[in-house]
Image (cartoon, rainbow, N blue to C red):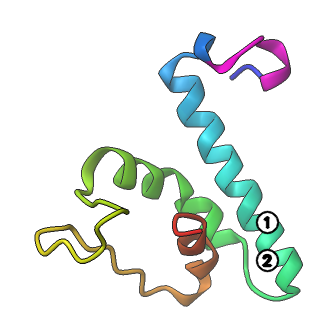
Amino acid sequence: MRTYKEIENFIEWSEEDKDQFAVSVIKGLVMDGVRNANSGHTGGAMSSADFVYVLFTDFLNFDPNNPKWFNRDRFVLSAGHESMLFTQFYI
């Protein structure tokens, strides 16, 4: 994956580069969130970032502008150690 400094603008990025960059940003936000909270675990959230990104971008049907849409898909996260990952998708 190329870094953002190697490319003049994001239009030149391949879809794979964009996806990998997005997952890297999510993992960075998880680390920052745990550090800022001075509490929590990064392992579970960082290891799940890849599949949760694919799940949310390619498979789940939802509309952030209409959270009461009856026919939306629901995502239930029951692992408390991964709660920091969940917050990255809803900020």
Q: Residue at x 78, y 24 (%)?
A: 4
Q: Residue at x 11, y 69 (%)?
A: 71
Q: Is the N terminus in the top left, top right, bottom left or bottom right quadrant?
A: top right
Q: Which labelled disc corresponds to residue 61?
A: none
Residue 49 position, x and y percent, is 55, 57
Which residue is nearer to you in this view: 84 or 64?
Answer: 64
Residue 52 position, x and y percent, is 44, 58
Q: Which residue is mark 2?
A: 34
Q: Residues within 10 Å of mark 2 (few under 14, many from 20)?
A: some
67 vs 48: above or below: below
Residue 72 position, x and y percent, is 19, 67
Q: Is residue 65 left or right of residue 47?
A: left
- Asked if the stretch drawn in magenta spans residue 7, the answer is yes
Q: Residues within 10 Å of mark 1 (few under 14, many from 20)?
A: some
Q: Residue at x 59, y 70 (%)?
A: 85
Instruction: Give the amino acid at mark 2.
Output: Val
List the single residue furthest toward the front. 65
SS label for mark 2: helix
Q: Which residues are magenta?
A: 4-10
39 vs 87: above or below: below
35 vs 7: above or below: below
Residue 18 position, x and y percent, is 57, 29
SS label for mark 1: helix
Q: Which labelled disc corresponds to residue 31?
A: 1
Instruction: Give the amino acid at mark 1.
Output: Met
Q: Residue at x 44, y 54 (%)?
A: 51
Q: Is residue 62 left or right of residue 89?
A: left
60 vs 54: above or below: below
Q: Is residue 43 left or right of residue 3?
A: left
User: Quick check: marks 1 and 2 in contact, CB under 8 Å?
Assistant: yes
